[in-house]
Each structure stands twice: as C-alpha cells, then as structure tokens.
Image (tube, rainbow, N blue to C red):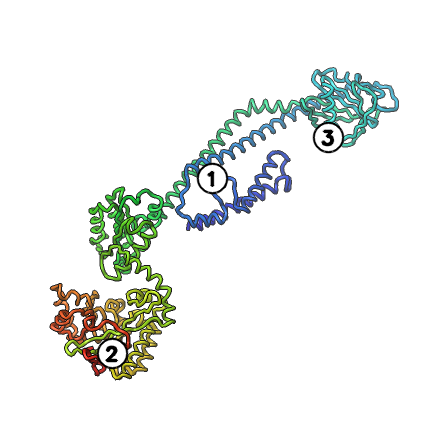
Amino acid sequence: MSVLFCSNMNTIDRSLRGVGGAILVLISPAGLDLLDRDVMAWFCLFFGAANLIAALSGWCFMYSLIGLNSSADAVADDAANPLEKLDFRSLRNKSALGFGAIAVLLATLYAFEAFQAARDGALHFEIKALHDVTEIVLEEVEHKLEALPPSEGELSTRMTSQQLLAALYHFDEPMFLLVGDSQGWLHSYKNIEPGLAQQILTSARSQLQLPIAETEALIGDRHERVFHSDTTPLFFEAEAIDGTFIFMPHDVELPGLGVVRVVLGRVSTSREDALAEVAQHLGLFSLIVFWLAIWGAVGVAYFIWRYVESANRRVYKLATTDQATGLANDYALRELMENGAFFSTERDMKIVGMHLRNLSNIASNTTLKLLNQLLSELGRKLTSGMGEDQYLARLNDGTIILIAPEEQLQVFEQFRQSVNEVQWVGDFQFTLEPTEVQLSYPTDVDSFESLRTAVSQLVASAKKMRIPVLRYDQSLMERSDKLDDYASEISRALHQHEFELYLQPKIDMDERVIVGAETLIRWNHPQDGLLAPGLFMDVIGHSNLRSQFATFVIEETALMAKKLRAEGYMIPLSFNLSADDIFDANVQATLATVAKSLDLQQVPHLEIELIEAQTSINIARIKEALRLINWLGYTVALDDFGTGMSSLSYSNELPVNTIKIDKSFVDRLLVSEGTEPSIRAIMLLAEGYGFNVVAEGVETQEQAETLRRLGCRVAQGYLYSKPVPFDDFKLLCSSAELSCSSAAGSNTA
C-alpha cells in the first residue's frame, strides 16, 4: 500500500513540476515573451527549464539536497528496503539549508525587484524634469538660431560651440547639448572632463544609431559632423565610467533653417535615488522579508522533519510489529540480531519457541474478532513484566519465541505456564496446545536466518514425532536439510524406478503362520542409499506428485499379489493410502482397474491401510469413499488405532475390517500399568464390532506373550521380520520357521 502511495505521489509530483515548468518557459523570453526582459523574466526561464528537466529525469534540487529522489528506481528501492531508517538530524539540517537557500534567492529577487521599481519611479520623475529643462534650453537655442544670418552650409559654419554653450548658462550641473540639422551636428558640454565627454558622446551616438563623420572644424575642443536620422527615441541613456547621462531629443522647425533637432543630456541620478529610496524606505522592510523568509524556511524544514520522522516511526512500528499479538516480528528480530547490541557471542542466550498447534482449530471454530482478541490478550500477558535483557517475538509461521540469558530459568518457566494455561476471552476459554522447541545462541544458531530455519524445522519435526517438547539436535537439522533436497528429486526418482516396495509379514502368533503382509515403501537413493519412508513421505504428501505416487504403490502392490498367487501363495497384502488419496479421482480410477484385474470382489486379498487420525477429517466423505472401496473388493484397516481423539465415537460407523494397535501401546505394554486395560478395551471393541486386530511393532517375546494373553492373535514387528524385498519375502514364506497360510482372506489377517 505504501509503495502504491509513493508511486502515485511520484507521478503527481513530476506531473505538476512538468506542467508548471512548461508554463514558466512559455511566458519567458524563450517562449511568448510575455514579460519584460528583466531579472524576473530570465528567472522564470531558468526555473521553468529546471522543473522540466526535473520532471523528465526525476532529479530535483531539493530532493537531491536532502538525499531523496522522485524517480521510479527510487520508489522501487524504497519498496525493497521498507525498514531503512533516515538520519533525521541530517534531514532537518539539509531541509533547512535547502529552503534557506531558496529563501535567500527569493529575498534577493525581491530586493532587486524593489530596487528596479524604485529606479523606474526615480527615472520617471527624472525624465519629466529633463523634459521641462529641455523646453527652457530649447527656447534659448531657438532664439540663438533665429538670430543667425541666413546662409547656406553646415550649422557649424554659422554657429560656434561657445554660442551654443551660452544656452546652458542657467545650469551649473554637468550637461550636454547637441544641435543638428540635415547638414550636420554641433555639440557642446558644460562641467564635464573632455575624456569623459568623449565616452558619453560615443555611447550616445550608438544609442541614436547615427553615423558620424568628423571634420577639422573646431567647436569648443572638437567638431563632429553627424548625418541626420529620422528615428530617435523619446529618451535614451549613455553609459560612462563615472556615471550615466540621460538624453532627450526635440525636433523644431525654424524659418530659413528647416527642421533642427536639439538633444539635451544631463547626469542621471535615478540609480542613486533608487538606492537611497531602498535604503531609506525599503531597507527595513527587505530585512523583515528576508528574516521572515529564513524563519519560514526553518519552519517548513522543521515541519517536514517532524512529519517525516513521525510518519517513519509509525511505518517502522507497523513494519516491525506482529499485528495480532503486538510482539516484535521477523523484521524486528532480524534487525536486532544484525545491528543491535542485545546479542553478543560472549554471552549465552537461551531461545524457547512456542508454536500454537490449536490455533488453526480455534480460527475455524470462532470469529476473526475473537481470535484477534485472544492473540492480543496473550501478547499483553507475555510482555507484562519483561526485563531489558529479555526479548519476545512472533515469527511469520506463528511461533512465539522468548530470548533471555540461560540462567533466567524462572522467566522461561513463567513463559511456558502463560502459554500452556487456559486462555480466557470474555466467557470463552481456549487451550493453545503449544509445541515447544529449545535452542541456544550462539551454540546452536548465530544469525537470524539460522534461528528462523532451526525453529521452523524443529517445530515440524516435533509435530511429526508427536512430542510436545524438542531440543535442538544437529543430526535432526541435517535430516531436515536433506528433506529440502529430496523434494526436488521425487519426480526423477519416480521416472527412474528408484522406489521399491518391501514386505513385512503379519504373523499368527499361535500358529506361527504368515497370514498377510504390509507393503512399505523404500527409496534406493543414488547417493544416500536406502531411505526409510519417514525421510520423504511428508514431502510427497505435500507435493503435486502425491496422486502419481499413490498410483505407483497400488500398481506395484497388485503386481506383487499376482506374482505371489502365481507361486501358490494366497497371502493378503495391505498398502497405505492417505485420506487425500482415497478422495483423488485418479487414485479411485486406479483402484477400480486393479480390483477388476485381480477379481477382488471374488477374492478380496488386497487391503488399504488408512491412518485413524485422518478418518476424522470429514466422516461423511470418508464413509462414502470407504464404502466404494469395499464394493470394489478391498478390505480396510485403521492404522495407528488408539491415537485418534474420537476412536470409539465413530469407528463403528466406518466400513472397516481390521484395526491395528499402534506401536506406542506395544512399547509401553511392559512398563506402564495403564496400557493393558487400554488394549483390553480395544480387543473388546473389536470383538463387539467384528473387527480383526493386528498389533504393530512387536519386538520382544515378552510383548508377544502378553498380547496373546490379552487375546490378540496377529502381530507384526521385528521379532518376526523386518521389511524385506519381494524375493526375500518369498524365502520367508518357504522357510521352516514360518509358513504361509493358504487361505485367502483369512479372518485373522
């Protein structure tokens, strides 16, 4: 969302700068030239061009000054680094510097414009005064010209500069007087150095744009002949080293002389007057404007700094906080481990993670609001009383971890108690059923990545082994790493026939006869050798190859059954499927094809073993699928019986033929007094519903004798045989120790 907002602001910002820059360039001298060619006009041109460049390239003076950019790449970089912190002090200083520079520029521009306005005003009054003076001088010049004798030739031959100078006798200030007709020009000046006069005359001639031809006639100290021009300005200025003169031409028609042009020039004081005006009247105001601009810049910079800092803190808090519990999340923990001083290789820290197994059930049976209240209350309870050397975080997979010094045993015990106790939200109570994992820093993990990976793998292993607490073990981690490698090799192994079915016999303990066998998958890995199903079955179950793998198991088991039948052994074989498998259309089609090829409806010697816990996923669908399987001719066995939560409540509703007592009951048979009553209850249940019973994992003769005493006849385990390849299984069938039952579909199997 923030990236989209930044992208939209970037587009709006650059669009506004582009449009504004185009307008400024359009009205500047480079466009329609709507402004006078003064500083403001050229400033508009420069500022408009700068904005156009900024809009096209993403570069901007203010952005670059404070280290920002409005380009698309910058937005992408911000998205890739959402937790990057800004140096707020540097941002504040740079913002103040940038806006201060703009304030100084604007204040300077204002002062210059104020000076220009004052000078224009002074020049206006100066021109008016010069016009009045020119009228007076013009009367004197007319009087003297009219007194001249009529004659032909240049004006300079009939009048001297001294006569012309007499027209200026009323004035004591430096002045120029030029008089000309169609024949030439005569000039005179008063209170001006000759060198300066020459500079002024040269400048004046360039302003009048009149060609000059010098003659040898001397008028004053120099006589110049200038051809007459019909184009003359109302007034013009002539620059010199020591000052500026302003000239005003007047044309007058005299009898006998024709049109005579009289040009009067005097020293211009408009600049001095403007400076005096600005200094006297605008100086204080300009200072106030400059002071306000600077403080305005500081205020804007301060506002930006505080706003950006506040917004960044809010975004940073959102980015580093788990929204459900209010605890720190992955980002915060990563930053702490990479940049903080909390972790030190010289101090041993203990890490305890709690994965809430029951959270998914709570989420499916309650409202989202209630779930959020539960997690929020749990977060508040866990953080209350936390010390500075203790750290709580919730990882992305939902595991809550506590990190504290190893010696703080009471802190970890309180953490366990808070998570394991019943959680109350209003009138509702919940149990979280946490899986606990334990590891150490820096012994077991030394970085965030290793910590997150280890916690995830330990939680997965603990769930798989069905144990509530699991300590870090390097061999376990290596095995988990192998699973990641195996996931990418499953497809190749299927196509290259690396999987093989082994057979483990089911024995009638009274008759010592093989009454059935279970097919168990093995992987002949080219590098790691023979792999047990525990190393790869979970990977297959969560992959897209699950259906293909189940089809392989069904077809291989059917092939073995045909081979055994050809050898004269009518031994029922069982194979394992998951609940997902029996719902799969491809698997159902394969089951139907195999049932028809083996005529299972007449000789039901294939059995499907389904883990009991999976039958509680959707009882109605499971019941329907198993009825179809029964109709095809397969028998059904519930594997790991006794470990499910609702065995007695729905087992009688399912079309089941056999129940297999889980190995955990057999292991505890001789060491736990409560195990025998549990097995008796299972035997009574089986007898009442007409189920066959098989005990799994029998490894000692004492276990076999106890099971026989409790009424169980069929066993499966290492006491009799481990899973063996097909050829070895045939040898078992013909051995003297064990023999095979010839009765297909025996009730004891």
Where does label 2 land, which residue?
A: 731
Task: Please give left or right for residue 1 compared with residue 145 in the image.
Answer: left
Residue 584 lies left or right of residue 33; in this view the side is: left
Residue 419 x, y percent position in the rendering: 23, 52
Q: Earlier in the sequence, mark 1 or mark 3?
A: 1
Identify the residue shown where x is 49% and y is 44%.
Answer: 69
Image coords of residue 226 (percent x, y): 80, 27
**Amino acid type of the residue that numbered disc 1 sits on in the rendered structure:** Ile
Q: Can you say whether 244 is above or below 301 in the image?
A: above
Displayed quadrant of residue 367: bottom left
Measured as percent of width and height from the top left, residue 123 is found at 65, 26
Q: Which residue is mark 3?
A: 233
The x and y percentages for residue 406 are 23, 47
Q: Amino acid at mark 2?
A: Leu
| Residue identifier under label 1 | 66
Along the line of sight, the residue nearer the viewer: 202 or 576? 576
